Amino acid sequence: MHDTVLGVLVSGRGSNLQAIIDAIEQNRISAKIGVVISDNPEAAALQRVQKYNIPTVCIERKKFADKQAFEQAIICELQRYNAELIVLAGFMRILSSYFIHSFAGKIMNIHPALLPAFPGLNAQQQAIEYGAKLSGCTVHFVDEGMDTGPIILQQAVPVYSEDTVDTLAQRILRQEHIIYPQAIQLYIEGRLHIKGRKVIILPEYKGDK
Ligand code: GRF
């Protein structure tokens, strides 16, 4: 069986990208990263991948007349590298239905809250300000809404009264780095079955008896 080809979209730090690279190197994910695409030339994520011999492409929104042309350029690169699963790893742009339909059911995102609580930006701050006692992270398939797609995996963490946005974000991030590779591997094993809003996780295939 060939390794599934991932196309990873980033805008910033790239710690989830790093967790995915580490999981691939440790054989916890049977995939290879075909290409990393950033909309931000300054993204630290681009520096991280240099030593791994992974192709990177920078596609800036401002270089295109409209959003569709920008997204078309991203789609073109993803197709050029034969990406089979699109992994959003801190990609800070909302994708249009045009993009989403180009890879229907094949785009994943990670969000630093327990969806449907605290969607959108600054999820950790939202959780603290709301006074939530639990928050966490969610890996979900991407649909047209803002962090509304079918949920694949979630992991909760406590929120302490003395937490700052940074301390909570770090606690959540440690869990992000665990569940994102797990969700990707479940997808690769063909174990994620989308049924309406629900993602059914099929049991592990143990081989013919
Ligand atoms: C993470 O908190 C992720 O949940 C959110 O954006 C952040 C990206 O961090 N979608 P990094 O670039 O992976 O370090």
Image (tube, grey):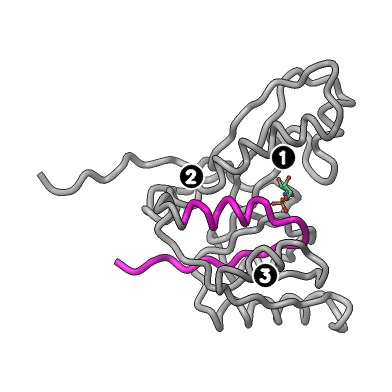
Which quarter of the rendering shows the N terminus?
bottom left
Q: Label for residue 122?
A: none
Residue 116 among magenta residues:
no
Q: Quadrant of residue 61?
A: bottom right
Q: How far apart are marks 2 and 1 (CA)?
A: 16 Å
The residue located at (49%, 51%) in the rendering is 23
Residue type at mark 2 is Gln
Q: Are marks 2 and 1 in contact (CB under 8 Å)?
A: no
Q: How far apart are marks 3 and 2 (CA)?
A: 25 Å
Marks 3 and 1, the one that precedes in the sequence:
3
Query: Residue under circle 3?
Result: 99
Query: Residue under circle 1?
Result: 112
Marks 3 and 2, the one that precedes in the sequence:
3
Residue 9 among magenta residues:
yes
The residue located at (78%, 17%) in the rendering is 160
Relative depth, front residue between 192 and 33: 33
Q: Which residue is most to the left?
A: 209
Residue 173, given in percent of the width and then of the height, sits at 68, 39
Residue type at mark 1 is Pro
- Magenta highlight range: 1-24
The residue located at (50%, 77%) in the rendering is 82
Q: Is residue 91 above or below residue 80?
A: above
Q: Label for residue 182?
A: 2
